[in-house]
Amino acid sequence: MKGRLLIVLVLSGAPLLAQSGKFQGYVMNAGAFRNVHSFCVDTHNLPPDQTNVINRFVSQESKPKGLLTKLPWNRRATCQEAGIDAIVRWEFPHDTPIFVAPDDVEGVLLVFRPGSPSPIYETPAVTVDGPEDDLFLGKLIAPWLEYKVVAYAVRILIHDWQYR
């Protein structure tokens, strides 16, 4: 009985812990970050397979109850439109450190002001583990793993935007 009560108490406090008072990412320009109301997604620096993953993510998660609807920013179709406050870009580093297996996928989400080379916000590196036993299988599910990395990075951004 004690164990069940402890589990209930821990689980009831989980939402409070998830919305702790700390940023999970890095805010380099708090004023610019607070003033973001519109954004575009930039994939020009990514290979076609990763661009497809991000386009599929944006399409799926822009639907009602999707992850991007939890971010109160208006998404614009292209980054060439006037009046965009932020450019969102994902990067998937290819230099895997020793502690990241070759079948794992790592990525970061960056937010830039239009025309600025320096980000105003960046998530920490997000890593999703791939299958350990078969490198070929890891390559086959890489798009799925990349989708999960993109989603996790967006969750961090949403948390930090709500905390700002």
Image (cartoon, grey):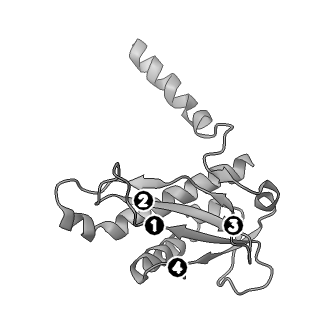
Cβ–Cβ under 8 Å for marks 4 and 2:
no
The residue that mark 1 highlights is 92
- Residue farthest bottom in this picture: 80
Q: Compared to 145, does 10 lie above or below? A: above
Q: Earlier in the sequence, mark 3 or mark 2?
A: 2
Separation of disc 3 and disc 1 at Cα? 18 Å
**27 or 143: nearer the eye?**
27
Give residue 120's position: percent from left, percent from top: 71, 61
**62 or 57: nearer the eye?**
57
Give residue 39's position: percent from left, percent from top: 70, 73
Q: Which amino acid does the dot numbered 2 rest on?
A: Glu
Badge nearest the viewer, 3 or 4:
3
Q: Secondary structure at mark 3?
A: loop
Give residue 29's position: percent from left, percent from top: 76, 57
The residue that mark 4 highlights is 45
Separation of disc 4 and disc 2 at Cα? 16 Å
Cβ–Cβ under 8 Å for marks 2 and 1:
yes
User: Which residue is painted at 37% across and 59% down in the image?
Assistant: 96
User: Which residue is painted at 28% across and 60% down in the image?
Assistant: 103
Badge nearest the viewer, 3 or 2:
3
Q: Is residue 146 left or right of residue 132?
A: right
Q: Secondary structure at mark 4?
A: loop
Q: Earlier in the sequence, mark 3 or mark 1?
A: 1
Q: Secondary structure at mark 1?
A: loop
Q: Which amino acid does the dot numbered 1 rest on?
A: Phe
**28 or 54: nearer the eye?**
28
Q: Which amino acid does the dot numbered 3 rest on?
A: Ser
Crowding at dot 4, Cα within 10 Å, few <14 / some 14-19 / many 20+, comes out as: few
Q: Compared to 9, does 48 lie above or below? A: below
Separation of disc 1 and disc 4 at Cα? 10 Å
Residue 140: tell me if it is visible. Answer: yes
The residue that mark 3 highlights is 118
